[in-house]
Image (tube, coloured by chain):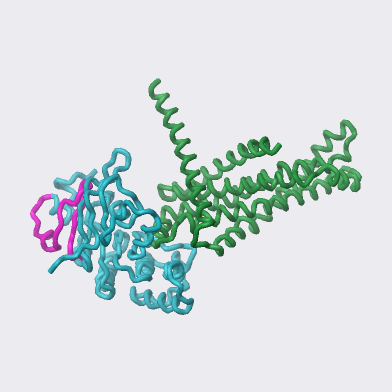
Chain colours: A green, B cyan
Amino acid sequence: MVKVLENVGRGAASVVEEAGRLGIMLFQSLMWVVRPPYFGRLILKQMEFVGVKSITVVILTGAFTGMVMAFQIYYGFNKFGAESMVGAAVALAMTRELGPVLTALMVNARAGSAMAAELGTMRVTEQIDALAVMAVNPVNYLVTPRVLASIIMLPVLTVVSDYVGMLGGYMVACGLLKVNPGMFVGNIYDILEINDIFNGLIKASFFGMILSLVGCYKGFYTYGGAEGVGRATTEAVVLSSILILIFDYVLTALMF
Amino acid sequence: MVKKEIIRIIDLKKSFGPFKVLNGVNLGVEQGKTTVILGRSGGGKTVLMKHIIGLMRPDSGKIIVEGSDITVMDDIALDRVRMNFGMCFQDAALFDSMTSGENVAFPLRMHTKKREDEIAHIVREKLAQVGLKDVEQKMPSDLSGGMRKRVGLARALALDPKILLFDEPTTGLDPIMSDAISELILETKRATGATLVVISHDIGGTFKVADKVAMLFGGRIVLEGGPDEIRANSNEAVRQFIEGRAKGPIPLI
């Protein structure tokens, strides 16, 4: 019985400790945004890595999600003769929910894992210590550019995802299911508001922060050689996926 | 002659959980001399070195570098002190996303306002100093272990530090390359006049480069002195270590 309580206590303590260290790293990485020295070139390089190089996966996931949404929504709406609203429903679903979340999950799998693996390798081969020894703050040099680039690029990718999602929905609805194209587009204009899009983009920024911060954090505190790097990468992807979905709910409820 | 100490470690203690890794280390490092800290693998040598350069904070104790205690400094003050240090890591710790030349240029780009052609000149000079040429464009992964250590030394030398730290400089190298690195350490000291701190378990290399040897056991410096004093020491544990015997008073595990 005591052992059980001990384990519960230890588990709770480690969760609190981890949350605290994540918070400290977030604070430090944002502090270095305003404090010199600045590494503008590194930020651009990370923006390319997180943003430009994720475009293919984001287009593919966005397009197919929009296409499948058109099918499913048509199936439902068809039952009460509201096929013309398929466009608006796809648009709302993409901009408010699926665009930001799926983009974040895909970029997390691609870039968040890479961040954990790269920083983890740098940790176990003492490259992070080498930075500190050369009087270069490792958080400023490694974490801040990644976090900042992700906060900036996730909304950009989400816009792409929103757009191709609607395009995919249009092709399925109007091409295969013979929904009137004028009605499809017209209803999007009537029902979708600019705030729907903004809501999604705020979420996307937030998700960008989560996935980069968790990826960097797990990499930064890696221990135990190659196995440690593997563990850090897995933990980073799992933890940030969960956090993205939890904060998706929290942010949606707050902005509702 | 008055001996000037550039680093003084006072009663340094550090534990990881129940393990007392450093249990009251006292040690002085004389300016312009080579001090070798000798001890077993896993005996806290690297932990001690990480304290000297401020990568770890002690549980208690002081480390005085040039008159100021670095254990109580904030990051900015610590970075200023670190500018006096150069460190060679055990596996060189070169940035593997950069070429060798960029690695050596890194501290110069970070901390000086030198033009690119000046930097290129210094990089060539530092690489030549460690016996390398035409490796600027090579990636660290394309170099042998010995060459990586040399590039690491060139990077450590880039800002002309007053104090050079070597973490196990000869570990993982063949005997000939080990000796070449020992020669390089001697040569570096002659050329730069820097204070050197070397941690090692390599007996041959230690006696070759050391002005002073300090033996770290059980989290304390148990013995310090010139290489000849150490070699003449009749303590059974010291003899066991320098003769490399598994049998003796020092337990294996």
- Foreground of the two, B179 or A188: A188
Q: In this view, does B111 lie above or below A116?
A: below
The number of callouts visible is: 0
Residue under the point 28% across and 41% down: B19
Q: Would you say residue B217 sits in the magenta stretch?
A: yes
Q: Where is residue A148 in the image (x, y as percent from the top left)?
A: 58, 54
In-image side of A65 versus B7 (left or right): right
In the image, farthest residue toward the top = A1
> Which quadrant is home to the C terminus of chain B?
top left
Q: In this view, does B47 lie above or below B6?
A: above
Q: Position of residue B15 (x, y in %)?
A: 29, 43
In-image side of A70 versus B77 (left or right): right
Q: Hey, which quadrant is residue B193 in on the image?
A: bottom left
> Which quadrant is home to the N terminus of chain B?
bottom left
Residue under the point 48% across and 66% down: B98
Q: Is residue A64 above or below residue B160?
A: above
Q: Would you say residue B207 sits in the magenta stretch?
A: no
In-image side of A46 versus B77 (left or right): right
Query: Looking at the image, can residue A152 be seen?
Result: yes
Query: Looking at the image, can residue A176 be seen?
Result: no
The region drawn magenta spans B209-236
Residue under the point 43% across and 77% down: B134
Q: Position of residue A223 (x, y in %)?
A: 41, 47
In-image side of A183 versus B115 (left or right): right
Q: Where is residue A183 in the image (x, y as percent from the top left)?
A: 90, 44
- Foreground of the two, B209 or B26: B26
